Image (spheres, rainbow, N blue to C red):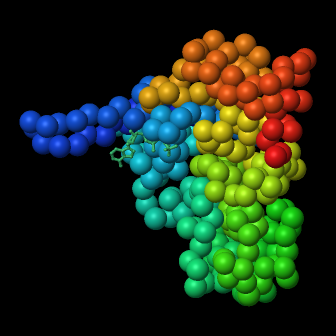
Amino acid sequence: MSPNLLDVENVNKIFTRGGLVSRRVNHAVNDVSFSLAADKPEVFTIIGESGSGKTTLAGMILNSVAPTSGRIMFRGRDLRDVRSRRDRLAFMSHVQAIFQNPFDAFNPLKRVDRYLFSAARRFTECRTTEAAAERADESLRKVGLSLAEIRGRYPHEMSGGQLQRVAIARALVSNPSLIVADEPVSMIDASLRMTVINLFKKLRDEIGVSIIYITHDLATAYYISDRLIIMQKGKVVEGGDARTVLAAPQHPYSIKLRQAVLSVDNAWRDDPFTDIIPAVAT
Ligand SMILES: Nc1ncnc2c1ncn2[C@@H]1O[C@H](COP(=O)(O)OP(=O)(O)OP(=O)(O)O)[C@@H](O)[C@H]1O
């Protein structure tokens, strides 16, 4: 049997601060487990309030934070074994990250097309400027842009939504099988949010990339997710198929989250999504 795309197995992260006398222990991620299948691209959402451990968990999946215990396997390989520069580069080409604020991800003095060219040189066989440009254009077209549109432009000459799409295009240059997107729309104008959210669905359906979508926003979470886990104080309090969880939330925190969505639209008919979608789009 071929391995899963990702296995997160009983993962813990404990941060300790202070000395012997004033030692403070923070169990940021507490025994979290889930898997993503290799043959079924999906949007898997990690949702929870601020401080619930989402970003720490993302860091462990991206292999930039070491778990205190438990293990994370990517295509059957323990991330602890991904150490050499070559292995790390190969891992990064398969697993890409999108962060919250696109303006932080780009140097204001550097043209945005440069980022795509360097990703093409770093992660692909493209060695000439022409080949890198072709690859950049190909990726930009997947997010509804083109190289001609962005060539020579600096970050401040673009909207947050456009820039986040460029960040996604850059992530796509290496043909990744997994994208970890940490609050990718929270800094974007509400009117442009849905463009980026819908883009994730399109990438899942058309190029077969799985997305781990990290958010505290229930409305976009339920709109976009196939499956989700709800985190509170480092623990998964509920998880499963997104519609099932929303239809019959069990944990008090999940019920609170559902009420938050309902209060936006104050309606609950046959399909919860018919109510959520307009709320998200505004
Ligand atoms: N490097 C660190 N050192 C010490 N404590 C940390 C570190 N990183 C995170 N924490 C703590 O771990 C807990 C979880 O933080 P984390 O950033 O993972 O939560 P989050 O759900 O992503 O929150 P937010 O939505 O605000 O980003 C918090 O209590 C945080 O203060």
In the picture, the quarter occupied by the N terminus is top right
Identify which residue is drawn at 58% across, 67% down.
105
Q: In the image, is residue 154 above or below residue 279?
A: below
Q: Quadrant of residue 146?
A: bottom right
Q: Position of residue 120 (x, y in %)?
A: 68, 74
Q: Position of residue 195 (x, y in %)?
A: 82, 55
Asked if residue 129 lies left or right of residue 134, the reply is: left
Q: Nearer the viewer, residue 238 or 62?
A: 238
Asked if residue 16 lies left or right of residue 259, the reply is: left
Identify which residue is drawn at 61% across, 28% down.
229
Q: Position of residue 197 (x, y in %)?
A: 78, 48
Asked if residue 205 lies left or right of residue 177, the reply is: right
Identify which residue is drawn at 53% across, 35% down.
49
Regarding residue 269, the answer to whether it shows in the image is yes
Q: Nearer the viewer, residue 282 or 137?
A: 282
Regarding residue 4, the answer to whether it shows in the image is no
Q: Quadrant of residue 162?
A: bottom right
Asked if residue 250 lies left or right of residue 28, the reply is: right
Q: Quadrant of residue 153?
A: bottom right
Q: Nearer the viewer, residue 122 or 155?
A: 155
Identify which residue is drawn at 68% across, 52% down.
185
Label count reads 0
Seen as rendered, the residue at the extreme left is: 21
Q: In the image, is residue 146 above or below residue 160?
A: below
Q: In the image, is residue 263 above or below residue 51?
A: above
Q: In the image, is residue 97 above or below residue 13?
A: below
Q: Position of residue 132 (x, y in %)?
A: 74, 80
